[in-house]
Amino acid sequence: MFCVKKQDFYEMVEDALEGLPPELAELLDNVAIVVEDWPEYSTPLAPGKEGDVLYGLYEGVPLTERTAGYHGFLPDKITIFRGPLERDFRHEELEEQVRVTVVHEIAHHFGLDEERIAELGWG
């Protein structure tokens, strides 16, 4: 495992966000995007195959499930986990995988499920 400087990792996440099409980025209202080193033991895991690794997590109410009465809620939260990404990807692959992870979690915000995200190549 190698480690990049924490600031460099944050910049990878920022670059991934800046690479979003503007029409999608505009829809990311009331969404906090944070970087954590590792998931907590209490972090909920999405159902999947045994051995799946959690690189990111979306917590909130997807846009497709919001009704007219949706207001006064805390921001949705997207967490990108630095430790698992650095552990599992070589330096030359890391930036691309950070981008994939950011887009994957944003897709959940837009209401896409794991199957559809995988079909689109972001799984």
Image: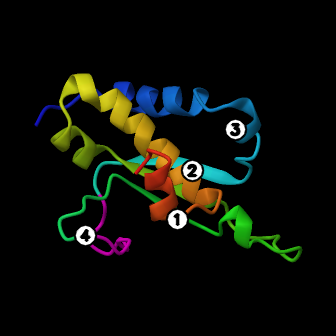
* Mark 3 touches mark 1? (CB < 8 Å): no
Instruction: Tell me the CA gap for discs 3 and 4.
Output: 31 Å
- For mark 1, what is the residue? 113
Q: Quadrant of residue 52?
A: bottom left
Q: Is residue 42 magenta?
A: yes
Q: Residue at x 57, y 27 (%)?
A: 19
Disc 2 or 1, which lies upstream in sequence? 2
Residue 8 in magenta? no
Indicate whether 115 appears above or below 85.
below
**Pointer 1: residues within 10 angstroms few (<14), some, or many (20+)?**
few
Magenta region: which residues?
Answer: 39-48
The answer to whether residue 74 is left or right of residue 15 is right
Q: Is residue 24 left or right of residue 119?
A: right
Q: Name the residue that disc number 3 marks.
A: 25
- Which quadrant holds residue 45? bottom left
Which numbered tag is attached to residue 49? 4
Looking at the image, is mark 3 or mark 1 nearer the viewer?
1
Residue drawn at x 31%, y 61% is 39
Residue drawn where x is 22% and y is 38% of the image: 86
> Height in image: 48 above or below 87?
below
| Residue farthest to the right, as pictured | 68
Q: Which residue is label 2 attached to? A: 106
Observer-side mark, 2 or 4, equals 4
Q: What's the residue type where badge 1 is placed? A: Asp
Q: Earlier in the sequence, mark 2 or mark 4?
A: 4
At label 2, the amino acid type is Ile
Residue type, mark 3 in image: Ala
